[in-house]
Image: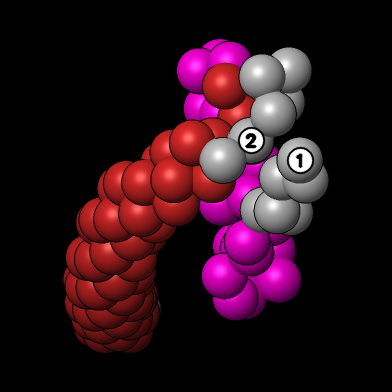
Amino acid sequence: MSQRLTEAREALRSAQVEQLRRDVRCEQEYGLRLIEYSAELGRQLRFQAAGKAAYTKAMNAFVGELAKHAPPSHPFLDPEHRKLMVQSYWEEALREGGIALPPLPLK
């Protein structure tokens, strides 16, 4: 009887050890996937931030040139309006997956 009890305990302990090994492997694999996902997300965010900075700079230059030819009451002449407009065009570009250009000011 004690022989069978000992064998059963050893089998249980062996099964528990194997389950712990599987759990550790799963957690390691999950951790690696999480690291890979985080790295990819970081790359995308850096790319997006660089893209936004370049887009904003180009749009500000573009809008600045348009403002030179705009009538005195045109919103392009208001710096806060220009900032909001460039931001909204950037967001639209992200949604649409392309570059959005502002409407031309009319004299």
- What residue is at 63 percent from the left and 64 percent from the top? 100
Residue 76: x %, y % from top left? 61, 29
SS of the residue at dot 2?
loop
Of labels 1 and 2, earlier in sequence is 2
* Above or below, 66 relative to 55: above
**Residue 58 in view:** yes
Q: Label for residue 70?
A: 2
According to the picture, the residue beneath numbered tag 1 turns out to be 107
Quarter location, residue 45: bottom left
Which residues are the magenta region? 78-101
Q: Which of 8 and 14 is in front in this view?
A: 14
Crowd rating for badge 2 (residues with CA inside 10 Å; few <14, some 14–19, many 20+): some
* Above or below, 64 relative to 55: above
Residue 43: x %, y % from top left? 24, 66
**Mark 2 residue type:** Ala
**Mark 1 residue type:** Lys
- What residue is at 70 percent from the left and 53 percent from the top? 104
In the rendered image, residue 99 lying in the magenta stretch gets the answer yes
- Horizontally, residue 89 falls left or right of residue 25, namely right
Crowd rating for badge 1 (residues with CA inside 10 Å; few <14, some 14–19, many 20+): few
> In the rendered image, which quarter contains the N terminus?
bottom left
Q: Which of 66 and 43 is in front in this view?
A: 66
